[in-house]
Image (spheres, rainbow, N blue to C red):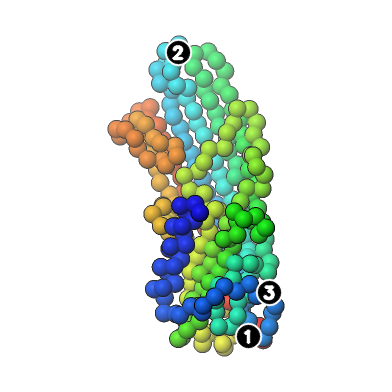
C-alpha cells in the first residue's frame, strides 16, 4: 500500500473516531435502493498549477546548465454515488460515477551558446479508477456513521491516468507535480439527523486549499533560492536573488457531500 494512501486512511480514521458517532461494524456493498437506505453523493471540482524555472549557469560556451522553464496546469472533476444502509457503514463500490480531468504542461529549454531554444508540451488525460483493477480497489469509498444527533460522512476518491504514458511533443516530459491533488480526494462532513429526517436530503459543502489533503502534505508551496528541488519546491541552498531558481505549486478543490434518504 502506498505511503500516501496509508496516510490518507489514517487521517480518515482519526476524523471519524473524533466525531460524535459510532460506526456500524462490517463492510457494505449494497446497491439496492431499499426504503431507508442512504444515498451518498461525493462530488466536486479542482485545479492546480506548478511552475519551475532554473536559469542557465554561466554564459555562452561556458554555460553548463541550460535555462529551463516548466509550467503545468491541472483540472479535474468527479461525481461518486454510493448506497449505504440506514444504520451506516462502509461502502467501497459506487453505484454510479463520473470522473475526468487533464494535466497539461509546457517546457522551454534555452540552450547554451548559439543553439536554438527547444519548446515542448505534454498532456495526460485522467479518468475514474477501474474497480476491477486491484491497485484501485481502495477508491472510491465512503464511510457513514449514524449515532446520537449526527450523521458523519467521510469520503475518499481519486482520478488515475487514462493512458500509460502522456502525449508529448518535442523533448517534453511530464514532471511530477509535488502534490497530485486529484490522486487523493477526501472530505469529511457532519449532518444533523433532524435536518435529514425533516427534508430527506441534505447537502454539505467542503473546501480544501493549502493543507489537509493528507497528513503532513501541503497543497501549496514555493521556493526562491540559488537551488530549488523541483520534486518538493524546497530550497536546497542559500536564499535566491538575481538569477535564482524559482519553484511554486498550488492545488485546491471544492465540492459537496449529499445524503438522501430513500423514501
Circle number at residue 36: 1
Residue at image x 66%, y 37%? 167
The answer to whether the residue labelled 1 contacts the one labelled 2, judged by CB atoms less than 8 Å apart, is no
Question: Do we see residue 207 in this rendering?
Answer: no
Residue 17 image offset from top left, x and y in percent: 41, 73
Q: CA distance from mark 3 to mark 2?
A: 67 Å
Q: Assign a secondary structure to mark 2.
A: helix
Residue 260 position by quadrant = bottom right
Q: Earlier in the sequence, mark 3 or mark 2?
A: 3
Q: CA distance from mark 3 to mark 1?
A: 13 Å
Circle number at residue 60: 2
- The mark lying in front, picked from 3 and 2, is 3
Residue 218 in the figure: left or right of residue 31? left
Q: Earlier in the sequence, mark 1 or mark 2?
A: 1
Q: Earlier in the sequence, mark 3 or mark 1?
A: 3
Note whether 112 is above or below 68 in the view shown.
above
Instruction: Give the quarter of the figure containing the C terminus.
Output: bottom right
Question: Which residue is disc 3 drawn over?
Answer: 31
Residue at image x 51%, y 79%? 24
Note whether 161 is above or below 214 in the view shown.
above
Residue 97 in the figure: left or right of residue 189? right
Q: CA distance from mark 1 to mark 2?
A: 74 Å
Residue 92 position by quadrant = bottom right
Note whether 197 is above or below 109 in the view shown.
below
Amino acid at each position: 500500500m502506498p505511503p500516501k494512501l496509508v496516510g490518507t486512511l489514517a487521517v480518515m480514521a482519526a476524523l471519524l473516531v473524533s466525531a460524535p458517532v459510532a460506526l456500524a461494524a462490517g463492510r457494505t456493498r449494497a446497491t439496492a435502493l431499499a426504503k431507508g437506505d442512504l444515498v451518498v453523493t461525493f462530488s466536486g471540482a479542482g485545479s492546480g498549477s506548478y511552475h519551475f524555472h532554473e536559469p542557465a549557469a554561466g554564459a555562452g560556451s561556458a554555460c553548463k546548465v541550460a535555462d529551463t522553464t516548466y509550467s503545468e496546469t491541472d483540472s479535474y472533476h468527479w461525481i461518486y454515488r454510493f448506497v449505504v444502509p440506514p444504520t451506516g457503514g462502509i461502502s467501497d463500490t459506487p453505484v454510479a460515477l463520473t470522473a475526468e480531468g487533464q494535466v497539461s504542461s509546457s517546457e522551454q529549454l534555452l540552450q547554451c551558446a548559439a543553439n536554438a531554444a527547444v519548446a515542448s508540451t505534454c498532456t495526460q488525460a485522467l479518468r475514474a479508477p477501474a474497480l476491477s483493477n486491484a491497485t484501485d480497489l481502495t477508491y472510491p469509498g465512503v464511510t457513514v456513521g449514524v449515532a446520537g444527533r449526527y450523521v458523519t460522512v467521510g469520503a475518499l476518491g481519486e482520478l488515475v491516468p487514462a493512458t500509460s504514458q502522456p502525449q508529448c511533443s518535442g523533448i517534453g516530459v511530464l514532471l511530477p507535480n509535488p502534490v497530485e491533488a486529484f490522486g487523493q480526494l477526501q472530505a469529511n462532513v457532519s449532518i444533523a439527523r433532524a435536518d435529514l429526517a425533516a427534508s430527506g436530503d441534505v447537502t454539505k459543502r467542503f473546501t480544501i486549499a493549502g493543507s489537509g489533503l493528507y497528513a503532513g502534505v501541503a497543497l501549496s508551496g514555493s521556493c526562491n533560492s540559488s537551488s530549488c528541488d523541483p520534486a518538493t519546491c524546497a530550497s536546497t541552498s542559500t536564499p535566491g536573488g538575481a538569477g535564482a531558481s524559482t519553484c511554486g505549486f498550488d492545488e485546491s478543490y471544492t465540492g459537496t457531500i449529499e445524503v438522501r434518504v430513500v423514501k
